[in-house]
């Protein structure tokens, strides 16, 4: 697929956030979303991502379920969405849109304390 503009990609991310249920979206006030070109080698290393896998997004911070911290003191959490890996694996704009939605919702799930194992159990990806 040909790359899309940053503005078009940002629109996809915004649409994915807007598609969340209202009660969840309201609990994202202290989450900073950013769009970056691609993850760094350190992002892969620190998150134990194998060399043969892509990294589409990252949640950074303390999940809302972490009772060991004062949630307000730990904020803001951050969700980083990486544009180039999405474009690399998607063959159409529709596929790109679907993958961006999946990535945003996956990273938001981490904000709410749902880990990868649980996401896999419930068939979220």
Image: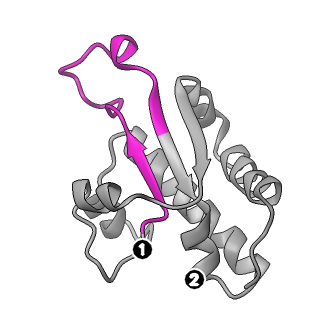
Residue lying at 69% horizontally and 88% vertically, measured from the top left? 91
Question: Residue 89 in the image: x percent, y percent?
Answer: 57, 83
Work out whether residue 88 or residue 110 is closer to the camera in this orientation and state it. Answer: 88
Q: Residue at x 41, y 45 (%)?
A: 59
Q: Secondary structure at mark 2?
A: helix
Mark 1 crowd level (few <14, some 14–19, many ≥20, 10 Å Cα): some
Magenta-drawn segment: 55-78
* Percent of width and height locating residue 107: 46, 51
Which of the numbered marks, if any, corresponds to residue 89?
A: 2
Circle 1 sits in a helix, a strand or a loop, which is it? loop
Figure colour scheme? one colour
The foreground one among 55 and 20 is 55
Above/below status of 107 relative to 102: above
First in sequence: mark 1 or mark 2? 1
Q: Residue at x 44, y 59 (%)?
A: 39
Residue at the image position 33 percent from the left and 48 percent from the top? 114
The reply, left or right, for residue 6 in relation to residue 29 is right
Q: Which mark is residue 46?
A: none
Q: Which residue is mark 1?
A: 54
Task: Return the residue nearer the eye: 2 or 98.
Answer: 2
Name the residue furthest left.
68
Left or right: residue 108 versus residue 18 is left
Q: In which quadrant is the N terminus drawn?
A: bottom right
Report if residue 58 lies within the magenta region: yes
- Quarter of the picture holding the C terminus: bottom left
């Amino acid at each position: 697929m040909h790359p899309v503009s940053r503005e078009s990609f940002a629109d996809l991310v915004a649409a994915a956030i807007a598609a969340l249920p209202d009660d969840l979206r309201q609990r994202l006030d202290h989450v900073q979303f950013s769009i970056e070109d691609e993850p760094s080698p350190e992002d892969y290393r620190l998150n134990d991502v194998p060399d043969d896998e892509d990294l589409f997004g990252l949640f950074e911070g303390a999940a809302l379920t972490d009772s060991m911290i004062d949630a307000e003191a730990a904020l803001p959490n951050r969700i980083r969405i990486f544009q180039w890996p999405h474009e690399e694996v998607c063959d159409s704009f529709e596929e790109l849109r679907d993958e961006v939605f999946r990535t945003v919702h996956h990273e938001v799930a981490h904000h709410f304390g749902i880990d990868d194992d649980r996401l896999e159990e419930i068939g979220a990806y």
